[in-house]
Image (tube, rainbow, N blue to C red):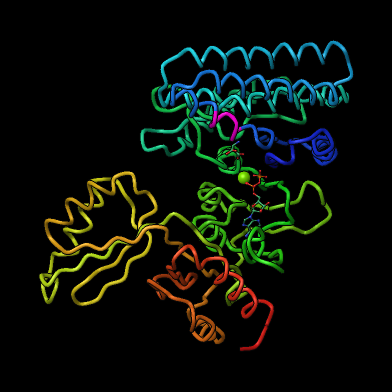
Amino acid sequence: MKVLKFGGTSVGSVENMSNVKSIINDGKKKVVVLSAMSGTTNQLVAIAQNIADNKPNEAIEKINKLHETYFITIDKLLQKKGLNEDVKTYVSGVFNFLVECTYKVFSENLENQIVAQGELLSTYMFNSYLKQENISSTLLPALSFMRIDEFKEPEIDHIAKNLQAILNNAEDSLIYITQGFICLNNNDEISNLQRGGSDYTATIIGAAIKAEEVQIWTDIDGMHNNDPRHVDNTKPISNLSFDEAAELAYFGAKILHPQTVTPVRADNIPVRLKNTMNPEAHGTLISSDTSENGIKAIAAKDNITAIKIKSARMLQAHGFLKKVFEIFETYKTSIDMITTSEVAVSLTIDDDRNLDKILAELDKIALIEVDKNQSIVCLVGHSIVNHQDTYKLFQILQDVKIRMISYGGSNNNISLLIDTKHKIKTLQKLNDYLFELVTL
Ligand code: ADP
Ligand code: ASP
Ligand code: MG
């Protein structure tokens, strides 16, 4: 069985939902994971923020507007009167719930309940649409099998056991539809897999049912060799290894949730990235194949904070780095890049929620310098450290101000830390010289 995930744009309009219908209606058994319609989760986050800021009227205004747009879509999507009315009743129930939330005291749990509604809406609507088109499908409620533990990691065994039981008892059907993104936490409260989490849902389900393949259907022809939102002339990459895809996703390629390949890698389940609006295009196949060497793609991750920790005590002394790492460990903050010299260590973090506390501790043992608004630019490919063309990178970057560089930590990744204001220029320059073969 395959798992097919369709993102926000793919279910974001009646026309695209019709494309999805054609793609999944091939007579083969499958699990279909859907995101919320594009824009919905952003609106739900904004509604939750209004409640947090004690602005219930602004929240209600947004809720009413969104309710109206859903009714317009339902009228276009569902002509059969019974189905149209049934879906409107369901959708109104969701929007009434959201209005009730505006009277409640804000909490993280309330926010999680609010943002979960997008996937509940899209799956209910799409399942009804298939009914109208006489395609048999069954809705599997994600909240009855998707669960994360206290560390926010998916509980694959629990998920596998429960999903299998649900599939065994469900009506026999070729198409099983479920919600991406949403799950329960270890206290059985509604939670989620973080923004963009539907990709992760798809590979978690893929691992749980030992799927033959996971397909991520989105609005672009697969993983491009650079960020198409900022760089001209980017191109789709036809093959990536699990390692390469994991690095790109982790270091900012928005097309994939950072954890997407983690669940399927051990079982060698391929992940295919495809374009819902252009299904004929090859897209990207992510697998264990590592046959091509050299720099394949570039990604960038923003909102990075760099910390320089300087201490004469480091000189020929042992135990200093241990102390530094323990401070980050105490505040559960992971470090992305690290470089050292004899008397200083520079490192980067992307989670700065505990920055003040970390700095206060570091201040006791060293001199500290902090640079915010940094970006990690990550060059990814198989065995790039050894590749004969990699030296060019250093020529290309002659006039880019690099704050840190990480080379040799893995054979598949070279990372540069730069000020975010230089990011787009750097990405474009690297693209031109590495992929467009512009000569220096
Ligand atoms: P979905 O809603 O289908 O999950 P996303 O918006 O999360 O879609 O991801 C697809 C988008 O990711 C593309 O439209 C593109 O703008 C962006 N993107 C960023 N980096 C890359 C990349 N390296 N390759 C392809 N797309 C990328
Ligand atoms: N709807 C969620 C989001 O916008 C999950 C997803 O689309 O993958 O983040
Ligand atoms: Mg996405």
Q: Report which quarter residue 408 is drawn in.
A: bottom left
Q: Is residue 121 above or below residue 26?
A: above
Q: Is residue 307 visible?
A: yes
* Front in this rendered view, residue 181 or 365: 365
Instruction: State whether residue 106 is above or below residue 198.
Output: above
Residue 126 horizontal/vertical position (percent): 76, 27
Residue 136 left/right relative to 211: right
In percent of the image, x 55 and y 87: which residue is there?
388
Horizontally, residue 145 falls left or right of residue 138, namely left
Q: Check the picture and name the quadrant holding the N terminus.
A: top right
Secondary structure mostly seen in the magenta stretch: helix
- Residue 17, image x, y percentages: 80, 35
336 or 398: nearer the viewer: 398
Please say whether residue 373 is one of the residues in the magenta stretch: no
Query: In what quadrant of the picture does the C terminus appear?
Result: bottom right
Q: Is residue 381 among the parts visible in the rendering?
A: no
Judging depth in this view, the residue of 84 and 438 nearest the camera is 438
Which of these two is toward me, 115 or 180?
Answer: 115
Q: Position of residue 205 (x, y in %)?
A: 59, 38
- Specify whether residue 45 is painted magenta: yes
Q: What percent of the width, then of the height, locates residue 355?
A: 28, 49
Which residue is painted at 55% across and 40% down in the image? 197
Residue 41 position by quadrant = top right
Q: Is residue 316 above or below residue 35?
A: below
The residues colored magenta run 41-46
